[in-house]
Amino acid sequence: MKTGDLAVMHEDGYVEITGRIKDMVIRGGENIYPREIEEFLYTHPDILDAQVIGVPDEKYGEELCAWIRMREGAEPLDAAAIRAFATGKLAHYKIPRYVQIVEEFPMTVTGKVRKIEMREKTIAALHLGTGHGAGDTPV
């Protein structure tokens, strides 16, 4: 069985999901690479840092969510502001549907962003269901 997830099986037989093999998001059959969108978001003068993840969506399989750290003193952006900034510069299917303004990203002890944790928190905050996109198989 292949899910696109990295996992560790414990001695008691339980499986713990630890990450995704690839960060690629498949939205309505389109392959989207979050890094491309993150690089674009860095061009906004009020955005200090951005991370883009895929979250489950009934219609498209997955949708995009941008976690954004704002520059000090900047007004927080919402999805409509990001859409306005990106329209005409990014393909419409690459514009994040959801935007989360955060102070920091969840990090591993080695300093890497924990996108799996971001995904879980976004699913819970937006009440998006199971957490599995189209093509993902529950482990």
Image (cartoon, helix red, strand yellow):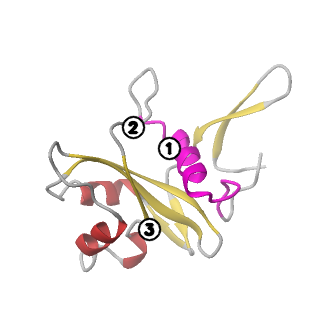
Tags 3 and 2 in contact by the CB under 8 Å rule? no
Q: Residue at x 48, y 36 (%)?
A: 114
Crowding near pointer 1: few (<14 within 10 Å), some, many (20+)? many
**Of callouts 2 and 1, which one flags the residue occurring earlier in the amino acid sequence?**
2
Please tell me the numbered disc located at residue 118. Answer: 1
Q: Is residue 98 magenta?
A: no
Question: What x and y, as percent, mark residue 110?
Answer: 42, 22
Quadrant (top left, top right, bottom left, bottom right) of the C terminus: top right
Q: Residue furthest right?
A: 12
Q: Quadrant location of residue 116?
A: top right
**Of callouts 3 and 2, which one flags the residue occurring earlier in the amino acid sequence?**
3
Residue holding disc 3: 97
Is residue 77 found left or right of 108 in the rendered image?
left
Part of the protein shown in magenta: 113-133
Pick whichever, 18 or 84, lies toward us.
Answer: 84
Question: What x and y, as percent, mark residue 100?
Answer: 40, 53
Residue type marked 3: Arg
Residue type marked 1: Met
Residue 82 vs 6, above or below: the answer is below
**Of callouts 1 and 3, which one flags the residue occurring earlier in the amino acid sequence?**
3
Residue 15 vs 135, above or below: the answer is above
Residue holding disc 2: 105
Pick whichever, 125 or 67, lies toward us.
Answer: 125
